Amino acid sequence: MKEPTMRPDVILETRKLSKEFPITTGAWGKQVGEVKAVTDVDLQIKQGQTVGLVGESGCGKSTLGRTILRAYEPTSGQILFRETDGSVVDLAGLSEKQLKPYRRSIRMVFQDPFSSLNPRMTLADIIGEPLRVNTVVPEAAIEGKVVELLTKVGLRPEYLHRYPNAFSGGERQRVGLARALALDPRLVVADEAVSALDVSVRAQILNLMKDLQEEEDLTYLFISHDLGMVEYMADEVVVMYVGHIVESGPTEELYDRPLHPYTEALLSAVPNPDPSAADRRERIVLKGEVADPTNVPSGCPFRTRCAYAQDKCTSDVPELREVSSGRRVACHFAEELDLRGLSELGAA
Amino acid sequence: MQQTRTSEPTGRRVLDTDAPYVLDVRDVRTEFQLEDGVVGAVEGVTLQVRRGETLAVVGESGCGKSVMARSILQLVDRPGKIVGGQVWVPVPPIDPETAKRRRGLFSRKKAPTIPVVTDPDAPEGMVDLLASDPEILRAVRGKRISMVFQEPMTSLSAVHKVGDQIAETILLHEPVTTEDARKRAIELLRRVGIAAPEKRVDAYPFELSGGMRQRVMIAMALACDPELLIADEPTTALDVTTQAQILELLKSLRDETGMAIMIITHDLGVAAQLADSIAVMYLGNVVEYGDLAEVFRHPKHPYTRALLASVPKLGQSRGRRLEPVRGMVPHPFARPSGCTFRDRCDFAQIGRCDVAPPPLLRDDDGHEVRCVLYEEER
């Protein structure tokens, strides 16, 4: 098999990655349709950076994260991953057995710290389990390694033999981070990792994630619906709508000058904790709901809610194209529209 | 056109500061009597809402904001118990016919009477819900004061059509026929922005999306033109775009009907969007209370300040590090002595903050703060 090529600074790249879930009916499970959760996604994650993935619920951002981990089997497309020696491998084409070494390199932090930790296991078991399963350290050294991990995420080593129910949401999420970091991963997929936490604790975890990134040279795929947090965390932002990437680019540029009407609407919808800005602000309120992924509209999936939609949007599917260096957008009229970014929306 | 632009960024709303109170909560205390001991969820909350005013109650989970709101209408489930305080509301008019229907046809209970108020501090023309006949409470609940809950799926009945659920409220409070109630339900659904209300009135909640269910909840709350709408985290379970829709809806309904709103939220952004005044709660106490713009611009209490600094603001967090609040909300059984925030406070003074609960200080503009730091200023 010919080895695929990637740009040297990229650690993970998806090419035309799709995931469909079948809809079945009847006793024989006859397939009557499919949910197109992720459609033809091209995504690049650079080494040491944080890519923020945003969109409303049901837009496929979690499915994309899980498909990259091969927690879901991709329907089609490639997931290219760079190994430490620089060679590139397509994770989508590997068997479960061949995949095992790569499971150590890509880890996940889950959303709900209450259901993602087994209440019958102590922290030593929870954090030690990946070490044990992958036999990276000898059994005798596991406890030492767990203590080291606990300290790293800001928990006290005495907690080793306690159960998760003794801890608050923020502490549990630290445990989740420690578990993800146990195998020295290179890419961490954080799926709404702080959304379930209280506001005052959220900032602690976000800062911890930033510090760990610096110390361990980690790469994050940061999935969130909160644009404020994504702005704080991410170097690059990818906006998804009904399984498609509609826009991507460096965080600052994208927030200052969105090119896709959906991004503009999302930015406008964020409530800003500044009453004077709230007065000045002109808001775009999207009508209706996210399109049904079992029955995606023809042409541009966003056209049913778009203020700028024209006839062309119904007939032609807009390609995700590069408009300037690093900026990609899937809109026929990206060049003609003059969309408002943060400053015009009165937020900055 | 599928997008609407609310193009006139409205200036600050002008409030009538002499408008009468629609709610006057005084020193309400609610406890949860558990096997392991007593947890004080609400530890003496005092606040007022004037007619047409929007008050935001903000705080982290576990600070008692929802229990406080539920205490107003006595909706606290066991083992929760309201153990003290007063909830003053304007005396509701009680129509003997509807009151009788609410009691049940064969009830032999007498019509309720407004209790005679002996308290000299009692406000004029108001009645204390906690001390009065349950019949008075029933005349207020759902009619004068109504509530929107956080989880629209669990707060709507899954086995009744949404139209019937809205009509039930109307039938309970007003002498109308079933057909009229249904017509009003359709009208209400139209008012909260549900397309094809004639069809949706016969829908079950599972057929509707999260945003639509929340609209149904709001329609139900508006059914009897309340003076005060208590919205408990109305947008927390929703997407940002849907959240923006619901906030716009609440704003326009408020401006249309002149009702007052008490919005309970943990999101300072939501509070800033909607409210005129704000009460910040921490562990069962209101620690800061005042005009929203004033509190956001010059937060006084260390907790309010820390809370504001720990939220990433769009366009302002670049290259800056968030300053989180230290530690976490203490366990309700391990409530610190004195000021409950002192463990996490950067300005805590040993010998002062841990000894006695901080005093409630009020400046000339009515900006209240519960912290010893401002004692010298006076």
Image: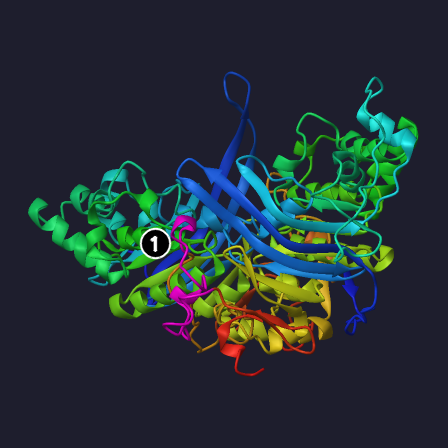
Please provide the residue range marked out in magenta: B330-356
Q: Does any portion of residue A317 appear in the rendered image?
A: no
> SS at mark 1?
helix
Magenta stretch, main secondary structure, is loop
Q: Residue B70 in the image: x percent, y percent?
A: 64, 45
- Which chain's residue wears label 1? A
In the shown orientation, is residue A47 left or right of residue B366?
left
Q: Residue B190 in the image: x percent, y percent?
A: 84, 44
Q: Residue A87 in the image: x percent, y percent?
A: 24, 60
Query: In the image, what residue type sits under mark 1?
Result: Glu
Q: Nearer the viewer, residue A180 or A218?
A: A180
Q: Nearer the viewer, residue A12 or B107?
A: B107
Is A233 part of what is drawn in magenta? no
Q: Which residue is mark 1?
A: A171
Q: Residue B61 in the image: x percent, y percent?
A: 51, 52
Residue A21 vertical placement versus A194 (above, below): above
Tell me the residue at 83%/68% (across/down): B18
Image quadrant assignment for residue B281: bottom right
Other residues around mark 1 within 10 Å, as few (<14) / some (14–19) / many (≥20): many
Tell me the residue at 50%/71% (across/down): A251
Is B333 part of what is drawn in magenta? yes
Tell me the residue at 32%/46% (across/down): A166
Q: Nearer the viewer, residue B144 or A233?
A: B144
Give the position of the C terminus of chain B as an image quadrant.
bottom right
Residue B220 vertical placement versus A141 (above, below): above
In the shown orientation, is residue A234 left or right of residue B210?
left
